[in-house]
Image (cartoon, rainbow, N blue to C red):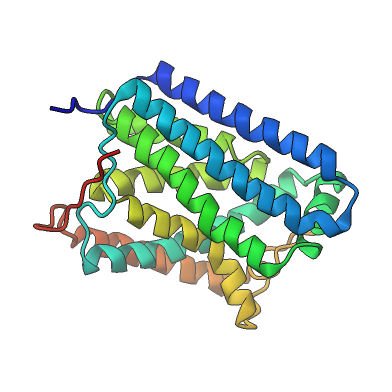
Amino acid sequence: MNKQFSLNVKKTLGYFLLMIFLLQGFSIITFSVLKGHPQNGNLILLIDIAIRLAVAVIIVLLVKKNEGFLGIKLVGYINKKWILATAVFTFGLHILNTQLTNFFLHIFPLSDKLIRLAEHYDSNSSLVTIILRLILIAPITEELIYRGIFVNGLSKLYSKKTTFILTAVLFAISHGTAHQIALAFITGIFLAWLYLKTESLLLTIGVHMAMNGLLPFISLLGIHIEGYTNVNFAVPSYHVWWWDMVGIVCLVLGVILYRNCNNKINNAEINTNL
């Protein structure tokens, strides 16, 4: 019989530091070899995708070897009410998060070097590779590690509050710059809560994909909202007031919808055997 999977803080930090070391190490090597070649934008993104997948596999296999059965649940306890509530709340959170990004960009502006680097790879990478990395691979690998392993493991030994804060801090640290750290921390709290409530990794992956993909999708539709669809890292501007109101209304409505959700849905649980 498989024992219940759990992780203490020491082990969690160890796996986290190993993951960051591998990701940063491989990324530095790749950038050092290919920098200065505009035509290599797609290649660097594809290599980054491969690195993320490889590191995620390494961490999962290592944790499984050391800890045994992981008990990661894919579907968990969700129904249409949970999906609707999550969609509404996520949209509101995304709107307010982008406004928070604008705020932090005013306080902690990016260096010219970082701005040029971002513009360089945006202009020299195809939409397909950007979508593949940003909307598919990053959400899947990050949710597997942070929610599937870290939240899942820590919650067996510690309170929900400790689990939320610790995993959100780790998630935020991994995102680098000041404006990303603030957003990642808030999003990390929400995703940890959502996973423990529903035990659905697919739902948190879907939220993560939406958070990463909403701006590109709305921009592709040709919709322009000042400070939202045209985030300028060099000269940030705030949202129009009514867009923030839309975000607040969606957050409040999402909370109301969540209160009407049933936490345990019969016959909706599917367990993996990781």
In the rendered image, residue 136, in percent from the top left (x then y), is placed at 52, 58
Question: In percent of the image, x 36 and y 42: which residue is there?
Answer: 192
Q: Is residue 233 visible?
A: no
Question: In percent of the image, x 66 and y 79: which residue is there?
Answer: 224
Q: In this rendering, would 139 be left or right of 38?
A: left
Q: Residue furthest left?
A: 266
Q: Residue furthest bottom?
A: 222
Question: In percent of the image, x 54 and y 67: which residue is there?
Answer: 214
Position above or below: 135 against 201: below
Q: Nearer the viewer, residue 108 or 117?
A: 117
Q: In this rendering, would 176 be left or right of 169?
A: right
Position above or below: 187 against 262: above
Q: In this rendering, would 253 be left or right of 131?
A: left
In the rendered image, residue 9, in percent from the top left (x then y), is placed at 39, 20
What is the quadrant of the N terminus in the image?
top left
Q: Nearer the viewer, residue 70 or 266?
A: 70
In the rendered image, residue 29, in percent from the top left (x then y), is placed at 76, 34
Q: In this rendering, would 93 be left or right of 241?
A: left
Task: Locate residue 4: give its quadrant.
Answer: top left
Question: In percent of the image, x 78 and y 46: which residue is there?
Answer: 110
Q: Residue furthest right?
A: 36
Q: Nearer the viewer, residue 129 or 192?
A: 129
What is the quadrant of the C terminus in the image?
top left
Q: Is residue 19 visible?
A: yes
